[in-house]
Amino acid sequence: MKCIFCEYCRMEREYKLKKVKLNKVIRGKAYEFVITGAYCETCGERVTIPGILDLNALEIDKQYRQFEDIVTIEEIRNIMEIYQIGKTPLSIVLGFGEITIPRYLDGQVPSKQYSEILKKALRSPKYMKEKLLENKEKITTAAFKKSMKATDELIHALSISTQMMNVICMILEELGEVSPLMLQKLLYYTQGVSLALNHEPIFEEDCQAWVHGPVYPTVYQLFKGFSFNPIDDQRYAIIKNIQNVLSVSQQNVVHLVANTFGIYGAKSLEKLTHNEKPWLLSRQGYDEGIPSQEVITKDLINAYFLDMHRQYDFTCVEGINKYINESLNK
């Protein structure tokens, strides 16, 4: 363990970190925060270690924003990233003073009113587009065009159904690091398992038989910027606050897929889809590597996964895992 000088023991002592409660009044309102404290292992008294005060300040700031539902610094950075806009132009577009966003990025806490404007911009590309058009003449032409292009792309990508957004959110929440390629395959398997177990599609979108397996084009457009990297909070922030409309049985399907197909990497899932009839039949007439936009119909997916369900029992993890193992080893 690390050591620090204990002013009570008057010598170097080992210390440990633990969470403690802190009562604090901010703007006349009382709060109870949970912060990190360092304590001498010998006498038990609290000691000061390098960086602890900065850590406590960050802990208090984060919890205060949560208590008051105030936009975070990370969320402001997400706004700048997804709309491809700088801090000063963003300040102007949203109707703030030019140095407002820079101050927020340095740690100043926004008012509730300004926080709501920032949160609305983060949730709604259509709102952001309205603000861009409203303040077009106040920023440079280059900044306007760059941000408008990113905003229009988001609006187009977000034409996906609420059900699809809900499934994407659940997958990202359960698995954490998911690449766009892996997400595409998990959406396909979620649809297949839903058709087999619930006898209905979990979302309305159709996938296409692309070179690397089934792909939902609108989802591809939304996350294509991440390439083979995990999807981070920048794009996920746009959809994670969407109302959940999935039934319990539909949510159970997503859980099941995440706990089975979701433990495999993108390339393994791609290989798996290449061994399955829906993709193979939809690719008939196309040589390897030739692009295709042929739809993999829900009827094809339904027939195949019903058949696999009868053979392997897709109601349980063991049955799906047996199917995956045997299919990958063909």
Image (cartoon, rainbow, N blue to C red):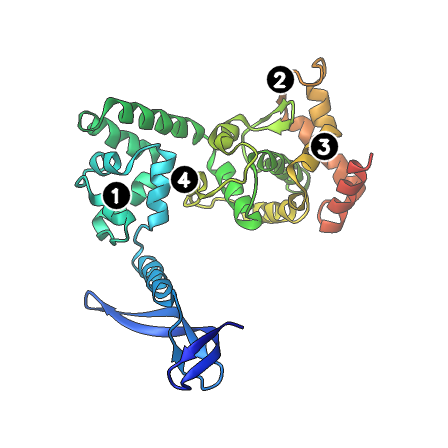
Q: Quadrant of residue 47?
A: bottom left
Name the secondary structure under disc 1.
Answer: helix
Q: Quadrant of residue 268?
A: top right
Residue 103 point in image, percent of width and height: 23, 48
Q: Which residue in the protein does label 4 denote?
A: 238
Badge 3 crowding class, 10 Å Cα cut-off, few under 14, some 14 to 19, many 20 or more, is some
Residue 210, placed above or below residue 124: above
**Which image quarter holds the N terminus?**
bottom right
Label 3 or label 4, whichever comes before in sequence order: 4
Badge 4 crowding class, 10 Å Cα cut-off, few under 14, some 14 to 19, many 20 or more, is many
Give me the disc on residue 271. Answer: 3
Q: Closer to the observer: label 3 or label 4?
A: 3
Q: Amino acid at mark 3?
A: Lys
Q: Quadrant of residue 142?
A: top left
Tell me if residue 200 can be seen. no
Label 2 or label 1, whichever comes before in sequence order: 1
Q: Residue at x 62, y 23 (%)?
A: 210
Q: Amino acid at mark 1?
A: Ile
Q: CA distance from mark 2 to mark 1?
A: 42 Å
